[in-house]
Image (cartoon, rainbow, N blue to C red):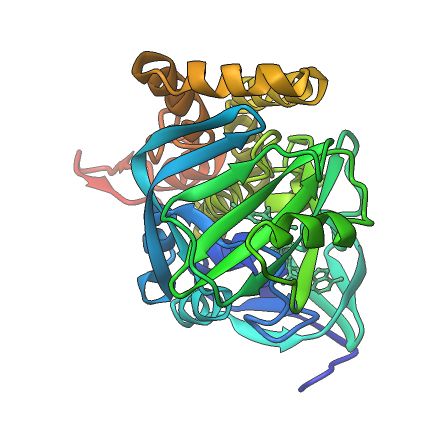
Amino acid sequence: MPGPSSSPAYDAVVAGASFAGLAAARRLRGRVLLLDRQAIGDGVTSACAAPRAIVEMMGATAAIQQVHDALVIHTPRGRAVWPLPEPFVTFDYRRFCLTAASGAGAEFRCVAVLGREGRRVRTSAGTVEARLLIDATGPRAALAGPLRGRRVAFGIESEVPVSVEPGLHFHFVPEIRDGYAWAFPCGGATRFGVLSYRGRTKLRPALERFMARWGVRAGAVHGGYLATGWTSGTTGDVFVAGDAAGHCLPLSGEGIRTAVLAGDRCGALAQRVLDGTLTHAEAVAAYRAFVARSRRRYRGLLWANLLVLGLPPRWLGAGARWLARPRVRGWFFRHYLGVMREEEGRSDATAVPSQATRRRDESRIRVPQGNGSHAESR
Ligand SMILES: Cc1cc2nc3c(=O)[nH]c(=O)nc-3n(C[C@H](O)[C@H](O)[C@H](O)COP(=O)(O)OP(=O)(O)OC[C@H]3O[C@@H](n4cnc5c(N)ncnc54)[C@H](O)[C@@H]3O)c2cc1C
């Protein structure tokens, strides 16, 4: 692995090669350096359930293990089935990352990002410099540094070769009173997990008790923090996407979809800066506006999360059944799945020509020649 002490030659450095980082890298052309402290596809933290459209967008359909048409919400007072308006899938993380990375033209280096000075990124193998920086390093935001306003939950899970009924199962059970447990089937196996909204980390006993309901024990366990908070999405002129920016959703803990959509958007905007059709400042403003447009939906989910934490368990069952009604459910999913989804181009400041475009156009203004004809001025 090369470890230059200084090389200012990159158009963009993307720190973090998971959901957000790979989505950004897939949008970038030119000299792009992708950094991660682990090999691509190593270090899964997630239960890997996401809308099929998101997996397709990353070119990773080969990683799909099982398709799900419903959420099943279990409470101590029974269960409610919420048919999904679009299919979700469970997928294999390593295969997803490797396939998505093969569609990006970036150079990859397995190094730890330690921080930055301006546009110089300090890594465990020296310093690299780039015109544009994207932080997609997850909850710790290793490049941008901690952003204000983030909140963290914590979750762990274990995959075991046992089958459960199809669907994505969420359990609000006594084993984990400040969060929920899940059972996500993924082909011939199931991912069982528990999450604490308050960020409690000693969850193994709760996971074991939950899995004992199926008569199974946890094998290898992985997990980590989930960062919510919906920060502005930039620090100085660094783009920040995914959990690094607090883009994981409250209530559900879903963060793959938002990481991919945010990474995709900042990668697209960064590419426009490299192409010269947006200035850096315009791209930063457009990305911040894109993030801000979903803030109201984020807040709605945060309130729902607080409600779930405060409600007596017997009311949760009634709430889940009420939400299962087609009209209420339709409204909920429109709100929920609408986060960060919008028409391409709306947030790219395309309606108004950018400063960069204006400057380029002005330099091409036709000036009258002596004979009355026109010529390009450059
Ligand atoms: C147990 C659990 C289950 C979950 N299940 C789901 C689920 O089923 N569906 C869902 O939508 N969401 C789920 N989430 C949330 C989801 O995993 C995250 O929101 C998502 O992974 C965020 O993606 P990301 O690309 O922003 O960050 P991450 O996936 O965390 O990736 C960050 C990358 O940066 C790298 N990195 C970190 N620090 C450094 C450094 N200093 N130098 C170099 N590289 C670094 C890491 O190695 C990693 O590759 C779950 C979370 C947990 C903890």
Horizontal and vertical percent for residue 83?
32, 31
**At x 35% / y 34%, what residue is drawn?**
345
**At x 17% / y 38%, what residue is drawn?**
373
Q: Is residue 164 above or below residue 330?
A: below
Q: Is residue 122 left or right of residue 31?
A: right
Q: Is residue 64 above or below residue 332?
A: below
**At x 47% / y 41%, what residue is drawn?**
169
Q: Quadrant of the N terminus?
A: bottom right
Res 214 quadrant in image? bottom right
Q: Quadrant of ligand 1?
A: bottom right
Q: Is residue 178 visible?
A: yes
User: Total label count?
Assistant: 0
Horizontal and vertical percent for residue 226?
68, 44
Res 167 quadrant in image? top left
Horizontal and vertical percent for residue 181?
61, 42
**Which of 205 and 240 lies nearest the eye of the viewer?**
205
Horizontal and vertical percent for residue 244?
68, 46
Q: Is residue 306 above or below residue 237?
A: above
**At x 57% / y 22%, what residue is drawn?**
301
Q: Is residue 240 visible?
A: no
Res 289 quadrant in image? top right
Residue closest to the far bottom = 1
Q: Is residue 19 left or right of residue 111?
A: left
